[in-house]
Image (cartoon, rainbow, N blue to C red):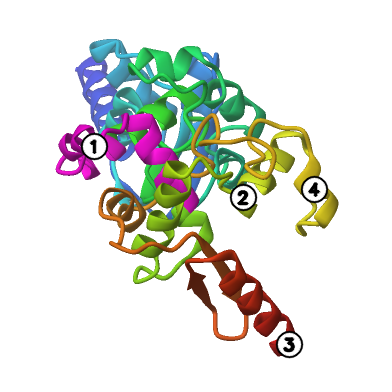
Amino acid sequence: MRKLILLSTFFILVLIYLTYAFLPVYVNTKTVDIPYGMPTIKIIDTLYRKGLIRSRLSLILIHAFRKDKLEAGEYEFSGYISPFDVYEKLSKGIHKLHKVTVAEGSDLYDIAELLEKERVCKREDFLRYAMSETTPKSYGLSTPTMEGFLFPDTYFFSKNTHPLKVIDTMYRNFLEKTVDLRPRVAEKGLSIEEWVTVASMVEKETFRDSEKPLIAAVIYNRLRKRMKLQIDPTVIYALKRRGMWEGKLKREHLQIDDPYNTYLYFGLPPTPICNPGLSSLKAALEPADVRYLYFVVDPKRKRHIFSTTYAQHRRNVARVRRRR
C-alpha cells in the first residue's frame, strides 16, 4: 500500500512538473540569435536561459517526437508563447524580418551599404554576387552586373540572408512591376538592357516626374545625332566603381578614362548606372516629342532648363551661374 502511495505521488509530481514545463511564458519582446552549427541541445539551453521556455524538458520531449531540424538564424518572440510555439518557429525557420527600403535611384553600392547596415548580408558579399557576370546570365540578361534590375521598393529580409536570395527577390519584383512595360520595349527598337540604361540616367538626372520625359527625349535625340551623352551621373558611377567618389564632381573627373564616362565615350554606358523607379522606366518608353539636345540644372529653382541649340544652352548656363 505504501509503495502504491509513493508511486502515485511520484506520478502526480511528474504530471505537475510536465504541466508546469509546458505552460506558456509571457515576454514583451525578445530576440535570440541561433548561430549556424549549434547543436540542438545547446539551442534548447539558449532558449531556456533567454526565458522563452520554463523547462528544457519541454523542448527535449517535443524534439524527441518530431525530430525536426531547428534552423539557425535570428528569431523574435513577444506575448504569450508555449514550447510548441517556440519549436514551430525554429523548425520552420520563421526568422525576424528587417525592413529594408531601397530608394529609387540607388545603385548596387548604395544597396550593399544598406543591406550591411540592416544586418541582412555583408556589403562585399552582396557586391560579389551582384557584380558577377554569372548572376545576370542566370536570368537571361546580357549585362555584366545586376545594376538596374533590382527594383527599388520596401523589402523584409531576415538577418544573414544569402545575397543571391536578396538579388532574386528584388529582380522578381522588377519583373512583376514592369510586366506591362516590357512588351513595349521591342516596339521602341530597344533591348531590355538599353531601356533600363536610359531609364537609369533619367532617374539620376531628375526627381521631377514632369521632367523625366524631357530628359529621356534629350538622351534619344543625342543618340540619334551621334552626339556624346555627357551625363554627369555616368561619371559619378565611374568614380564609384573605382572607389574614387568623394561626394563632389570635379572638372578633372570628366576626363577619366572609363567606359562609363559619357563625356569621353559615345553611346550608352555598358550597364545602367542605378536602379530606376517606375516613372523613369515609363519615361524611357514615352519620351517627350521635343527637339531638345541640352539641359542644365538650376539649383535655386530645383529644375532643369532645356534648349535645342548650343548657343541657347550656353546662355542658359551663364544665366544659372549668375543666379548662383
Q: Nearer the viewer, residue 280 or 161?
A: 280
Which label's residue is closer to the chain start, 4 or 2?
A: 2
Q: Is residue 285 visible?
A: yes
> Would you name the residue on which mark 4 appears?
253
Q: What mark, if any, has residue 230 been given in the picture? A: 2
Q: Quadrant of the N terminus?
A: top left
Q: Measure how far apart labels 4 and 3 are at the Cα level.
A: 24 Å
- The part of the chain drawn in magenta is 173-201
Q: Is residue 234 above or below residue 249?
A: above
- Characterize the local packing of mark 4: few (<14), some (14-19) or many (20 or more) Cα atoms within 10 angstroms: some
Q: Amino acid at mark 4?
A: His
Of tags 4 and 3, which is closer to the observer?
3
> Would you name the residue on which mark 3 appears?
322
Which label's residue is closer to the chain start, 2 or 1?
A: 1
> Would you name the residue on which mark 1 appears?
185
Q: Measure how far apart labels 4 and 1 are at the Cα level.
A: 33 Å
Q: Residue at x 58, y 36 (%)?
A: 266
